[in-house]
Image: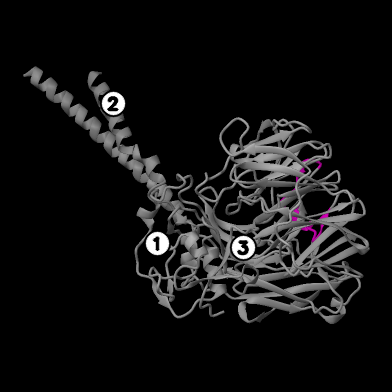
Amino acid sequence: MGSLRTFLACFVTAFFLSSAGTAAAYHTRFVADNCNYAAPTPTPYITRDGSATVALRARYEGYQWAGGCWNDNNVDDSPGDTTENPNTGGEGGDCSGFTFKVWRESETESNAGFYQWGMLRHIHGPYVAAEFKSGDGAPNITYAKSALIKMDALASQNHIGMIYAKNADGTDQIIEAKGEAYGTNIWTRTYRGDSSYGGVRRTGWSG
Amino acid sequence: MDGRWNTFGRRLVATLGLLAGVLTGAAAFVAAGSAVATRGVDSASVFVDATHVPPLLTAEGERAELQYDAYCVDPEAEPADVSCDLTGSVFIRAGASGSFRELPLVTEGSANRLVARVPEAMASSREGFTYYAEIAATSGQASMSLPAGGASAPHQSLPLGPTIEIDLGRHAFGKTQRADERIAEVSWGEGLNDAGLEQGRNLTPIGASAFDVDPSGVVVLLDQAHRRMLRWRRGSSTPTRVPLEIAGMLADVSLATDGSLYVLESVSRREHTPVVRRFDSYGRGLASAVTAERTSSQIRQGPTGPVVLQQPSGQWMPIMSAGSPLTPDIQRRRGRSGRPVRGGGEIVVLRRDSEIRVAVVGHAGVRRSWQITSETALAEVQLAEPLGQRLVVVARVYTDDVDEFVALVLGAAGLISRISLDAADWAETAPLGRFRLAGGSLYQLGSTPAGAFVDRFGLEVR
């Protein structure tokens, strides 16, 4: 009887110690388990329709502050990560990482070429929202908000979203990585008229 | 010997126990990881999404062209920017009854831009025309109707008719009207009567996302970050706090005449469209309904219950009837291009570049319409509400550096009055949740880095 108690006590202790990381690890292993560091594929062009298609594939995926890696299963695989923590290793781009990838930009700010990054390539790119707003980097320019069209962007000091479509009431449908609780999706927004937002255009569209 | 054996035996049993525990625990870890991995490879399927701005109100002689931006997304496609091929047709008829005629959609400029030209006879019809589109992947794997109700709830395009033209000229920024009264005010924070910011101050400030006012002057403010509403009775400076079981993210609200509160959540997931929740005045959940479409931006009270503006259809759809949820299919089949209003008829709004067309529409067509132009760029139309025989319109004017709202009172002879309002939009709200009209006053939800407030502006025409 004493041996059984010893066995059970050791079993239970070892079980909990060895499995204790399971729940905690759930939110922190998406990047480690799924993402890669493959080189991007240079492409000779970028089109607005093609970029909209790329962005649509990220719809319903997660949001990760400072992140840039997602799959295409329409589920946030790391929900509930701590906000404002770039190291939680969860699924999704943040707003600027998402824009960087959809706009096929280079890691090098002086390079305006087009680089196709795989969805599972873990990269954020060199720009935060405020830098996009300022038109930083060779591919990016500030642009009159009233003249923005599909897949141009509206950026503030701490957020950026791309125009997916216009609505009849003057709002826009914006495709964006909005936040940890929101993930990546399309929402109706009024960023265009909001003076905290500026217009940004990626240069070099073929169509 | 026995003592040594006993010690050895106890150590052996303990070791075996530890070993079994470690192995079982590790197995549990792997199993949990596999579950995550299985979710990770749960594949998405081919889908079609399309957007379209309907020519809801047309001027005489205007060429009517129906343009759709359509995407067919195949999760297996490589590279990811390749869209699968699309085909489609528009089904159109003059007026709002009779059989539809099929017009094939043709590509123009790119494979994703589909266009149909409205036949002249229909475009110039005094009754306007109604239409819907069917767009599909040529592979047959996915399709969509736009609007979603198809033949049951087509888009309606109406001629403006004899319209009242209003030229706002160049907007003079910096000459905003002072509010007549501050009805409600809260600080940002975690105190008893504070309103919360969803993501804190270091990310986009989002808080106090919507409000409404009832005819007696009671104001409710949605403090979504704290999952509650704050309610001010007329003349009270301290709100009553009413907990609500909501998601805690951007949402619009609408008060019904029976005192119940409808909350339109904005978050959606795959196969989980935004939800509308109905609460009584004590915050008890009464009902909930899922919306028909992926994106919803406004909830308002119509003559028979709440209606929600849904995208991509761009239609107002009833969401509940007599307090009970309507199925997404019923919502789709009852979609309307105009917003039904309590006093009867519908309000139709179309902003085109720096022009706003707005009409009061009845069964026989447009009763009255206004065509508002501006030298300064116009953004969204925040509000278009009847005020007796007049119509109040609130729209945002903007440049790249500054923005304000203009509130216009429109009458049969033109512009009756006009005021400019500070944008006061430090915190993000529901996109069209900033203004309400009640009892001859215009109410504005505003915010600064210090907090949120509701101001009242009298619109009585002197």
User: x, y (%) of residue B177?
Assistant: 76, 51
Q: The numbered mark 1 sits on a residue in which chain?
A: A
Which mark lies nearer to you, 2 or 3?
3
Which mark lies nearer to you, 1 or 2?
1
A103 or B114, which is in the foreground? A103
B405 or A89, which is in the foreground? B405
The three-letter code of the residue at mark 3 reads Asp
The three-letter code of the residue at mark 2 reads Leu
Q: Residue at x 78, y 32 (%)?
A: B235
Rounded to the nearest whole Å, what is the CA distance between mark 1 and mark 3? 32 Å
User: x, y (%) of residue B24?
Assistant: 31, 37
B26 or B264, which is in the foreground? B264
Q: Residue at x 60, y 61 (%)?
A: A174
Task: Give the quarter of the figure containing the N terminus of chain B.
Answer: top left
Query: Which segment is the magenta one?
Result: B322-340
Residue highlighted by disc 3:
B401
Residue highlighted by disc 2:
A8
Which label number is shown at residue B340?
Answer: none
Rounded to the nearest whole Å, what is the CA distance between mark 1 and mark 2? 47 Å
Q: Secondary structure at mark 3?
A: loop
Q: Secondary structure at mark 1?
A: loop
User: x, y (%) of residue A184?
Assistant: 54, 56
The three-letter code of the residue at mark 1 reads Ile
Label 2 CA crowd tier, 10 Å (few <14, some 14–19, many 20+): some
| Residue B214 found in image quarter | top right
Q: Secondary structure at mark 2?
A: helix
Residue highlighted by disc 1:
A123
Asked if the stretch drawn in magenta spans residue B359, the answer is no
